[in-house]
Amino acid sequence: MGEFVSLIQAIKNDKEKFEELLIKMEPLINKYVRLLYKEDKEDVYGELVLALWESVLKISYCENDGQIINFICRALKNRYYELYRNSKKRCEHEINSTDDIYFVKESSKDLTDALIISEDLYKIINTYKGQKKKIIVMMLALNLSDSEIAERLKLSRQYINRIRKNLKNDLKNYMINM
């Protein structure tokens, strides 16, 4: 009988033995926590420990250590994939909601809303200086694409796109902090 087989049997009899298994599986759990850097590390760690606990409870028959390790690793990997998919969905939702900020000014029919939004955009635009400010004005006021701006200013489209992403992040942070 292997080390993991006896450990699983001991855990089923005494829940305190779970800590020994947790110590052995800590490197794998930490790997998945690092891969999900966008999320709160303690929450991800807790979710993965819970997945480890659930996998131990589901093990009913085991012949050797290889089967147990494979089962536990697969359970942790599946929970990681689940957390990753949820994180990706939330991230895409946040990006989509920040994309809508550009069009709020045009779609608002109420004059006071338009003035407030214009004032907020003015504050954000004024945090930029020089060429970056010029590029942002071309994006928002002239509604030019990245390639059109790059062609006019003789800059790379990649640089223009990077400034657009920075502006999105600044707008998102501004909206969150309001």
Image (cartoon, rainbow, N blue to C red):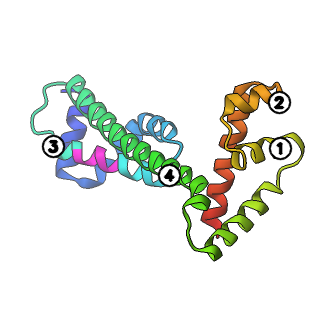
Q: Which amino acid does label 4 sit on?
A: Glu
Which residue is depicted at the point 77% across and 61% down? Answer: 122
Q: Mark 2 points at which residue?
A: 153
As drawn, is 177 to the left or to the right of 22? right
Instruction: Give the x, y percent position of residue 63.
Output: 13, 26
**Residue 130 in picture, x, y percent from top left:** 90, 44
Question: Please, what is the three-letter code of the amino acid marked with disc 2?
Answer: Leu
Q: Which amino acid does label 1 sit on?
A: Lys
CB contact under 8 Å: marks 1 and 2: yes
Is residue 19 in view?
no
Classify mark 4: helix, strand or loop.
helix
Eye-nearest disc, 2 or 4: 2
Residue that carries the numbered disc 4 in the rendered image: 94
Q: Indicate left or right for 13 with 35 as reference.
A: left
Name the residue carrying label 3. 58
Q: Main secondary structure of the magenta part?
A: helix
- Disc 2 to disc 3, how far (Cα)? 62 Å
First-in-chain label (4 vs 3): 3
**Mark 1 to mark 2 CA distance (whole Å):** 10 Å
Residue at coordinates 17% horizontally, 51% vertically from top-left? 13
Label 3: which secondary element: helix
Q: Which amino acid does label 3 sit on?
A: Lys
Residue at disc 1, secondary structure: helix
Q: Give the range drawn in magenta.
A: 49-54
Q: How far apart are marks 3 and 1 (CA)?
A: 61 Å
- Give the mark, 3 or 1, whose residue is nearer the N terminus: 3
